[in-house]
Image (cartoon, rainbow, N blue to C red):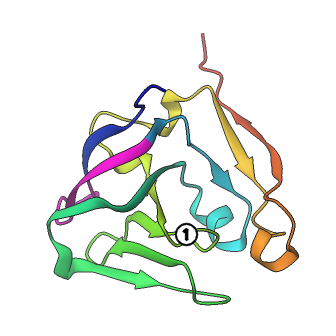
Amino acid sequence: MTDNRTIRTGQCHCGTVRFEVTLSEGFESIRRCTCSYCRMRGAVVAMAEMGGIKILQGEDALTTYRFHTGTAKHFFCSRCGIYTHHQRRSNQNLYAVNVACLDGVSPFDFAEVPVMDGVNHTNDTGQPTRRAGTLRFIPAD
């Protein structure tokens, strides 16, 4: 089995929060979500296991937002407002990291991004997570 982990550094928009993350599956785990919060936020995320995020600077500037069941913890910079990562509701041992915060990475680097059905969350329905669709980026000529 190939070790697909990727170590990256990242930061919020203003640079107050800086972090290092080990993406457990590299960029193979990228996705978006259709839940009410993710739909408005619009971030493309990649997964990191518990302990895979190390805050290098600005931990005191991070604040959290919780909604619905209050299980997921969404972290963002209290100065610039940028969402950096969140602890997932469906698997508390995973964090989803905003790829736009990673140095040298853009969400537009990915031609296709799977979109997961967060409206019908697996923890609410008892059913496996359903793929709602695919977000595609086609660069202009």
Q: Tell me the element at label 1.
A: loop
Residue projecting furthest to the left: 57
Q: Is residue 43 left or right of residue 125?
A: left
Q: Position of residue 124 (x, y in %)?
A: 81, 79
Q: Residue furthest top?
A: 141
For mark 1, does the 10 Å Cα neighbourhood hold few (<14), some (14 to 19), or many (20 or more) residues?
some
Location of residue 37 by image quarter: bottom right
- Residue at 52 percent of width and 32 percent of height: 108
Q: Which residue is identified by label 1?
A: 88
Which region of the structure is painted magenta? 11-24
Quadrant for residue 128, please give it. Answer: bottom right
Left or right of residue 71, residue 125 in this image: right
* Callout 1 amino acid: Arg
| Residue drawn 72% across the image and 68% down it | 35
**Is 54 positioned to the left or the right of 126 in the image?**
left
Tell me where residue 135 sits by quadrant.
top right
Q: Position of residue 14 (x, y in %)?
A: 22, 60
Nearer-the-camera pick, 71 or 127: 127
User: Which residue is drawn at the image coordinates 32% and 47% (left, top)?
Assistant: 22
Residue farthest to the front?
Answer: 1
Q: Is residue 38 above or below residue 24?
A: below
